[in-house]
Amino acid sequence: MTRLTITGTAISTEDLRHHGDQELAPGLLDLAVNIRRDEPPGWLLSRIERSFRTLKGYPDSTLATQTVATRHDRDPAEVLVTAGAAEAFVLLARALQPKRSVCVHPSFTEPEAALRAAGHPVERVILDPPYVLDPAQVPDDADLVVIGNPTNPTGIVHERLAELCRPGRTTVVDEAFMDAIPGEPHSLAGQRLPGLVVVRSLTKTWALAGLRVGYLLAEPETVALLKQAQPLWAVSTPALVALDTCLARGPVKQAEREAAEIAVLREDLASRLTQLGVDVTAGSRAPYLLCRVSGRADIRDGLREHGVAVRRGDTFPGLTSEHWRTAVRDAESHQILLDALTSLL
């Protein structure tokens, strides 16, 4: 079942700007933010620190752009480096003039927030469980469609998104978590499809939220349009060095190995949560799980009292105060979560 919610000037009550970092407080175990390590690895920090010696000069994105292009077998003219994925969504909202914008939910809310801030009315296609999109559910005349793959917070990988792409429509696919899936199945990053824009970041895999670095892949005409809307020197030299470093062959292989390890941990955690009576959304392939305990809107607050921070679910359109998202971490962190839930349930 799918619900199409039309929302123009009347904005619903969900706080689109709420994100996992707002759940944190000193002393809490962080299972609210989907960052896979406590700090960037040493080899990456060394490269970033060496870049400080060059800060006198203005940033030059040429090398990083070429590295992104090589990584995804694209032409450099199809690449735009950005100050994280968030900047990419803002640029799209500022540069495009859609007549009918549709965001598929539940999903990351920043793209919708950016569209609204730019004055665009937004319609929502709200998916019910199992949260898998059939392209036919998107209105045929929608000329801007935004969806995550895998989707945050459900972790679902959509297999038919290429069917959304057509002349006259911009299809924005947020692949911020795609590199957390072994082999990156159903990624569109290497495909040239009409109107396709793929957005990626380094935040989650390499613990670089504070550096703000990402990129998008699109047709050269779209990249040129977005570049005109982007401030000059928007991405810092350290961020460009991080991008060039993390997309080299060795780090890409390391990320894939770690993704396989995360998949094992995720399946174990999902099984143990289910045994406790938690309703875990099936099919997640991302480093997080969407959870719910029917009739218990107090679980998130209860977990905080036990020293565990998870991400609230009711700010994602289509979800409720009973929903919450937990990051997949390590066995020790999972046991702390499970022990707290055992006390609450």
Image (spheres, rainbow, N blue to C red):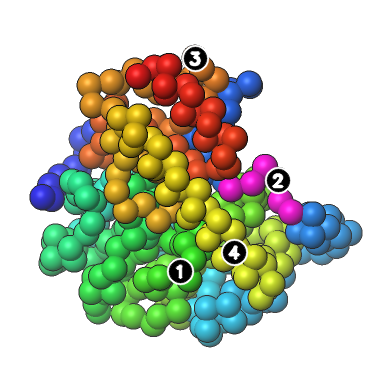
Q: How many neighbours does mark 2 have within 10 angstroms: few (below 14), some (14-19), or many (20 or more)?
A: few
Q: How many neighbours does mark 3 have within 10 angstroms: few (below 14), some (14-19), or many (20 or more)?
A: few
- What's the residue type where badge 4 is placed? Arg
* Residue 35 image offset from top left, x and y in percent: 57, 46
Vertically, is 277 above or below 258? above
Residue placed at 18% from the left, 66% from the top?
135
Residue located beneath label 1 in the image: 184
- What's the residue type where badge 1 is placed? Glu
The kind of secondary structure element at disc 4 is helix
Residue placed at 13% from the left, 50% from the top?
2
* Residue 173 image offset from top left, x and y in percent: 37, 63
In space, the residues marked 1 and 3 are separated at their CA atoms by 37 Å
Instruction: Between label 4 and label 2, give the one nearer the viewer.
Output: 4
In space, the residues marked 1 and 4 are separated at their CA atoms by 12 Å
Residue 33 image label? none
Instruction: Magenta stretch: give its range.
Output: 36-41
Residue placed at 79% from the left, 60% from the top?
43
- In the rendered structure, are the residues bearing label 1 and label 3 in contact, judged by CB atoms less than 8 Å apart? no
Q: Specify which label sits upstream in the sequence, 4 or 2.
A: 2
Instruction: Between label 1 and label 4, give the one nearer the viewer.
Output: 4
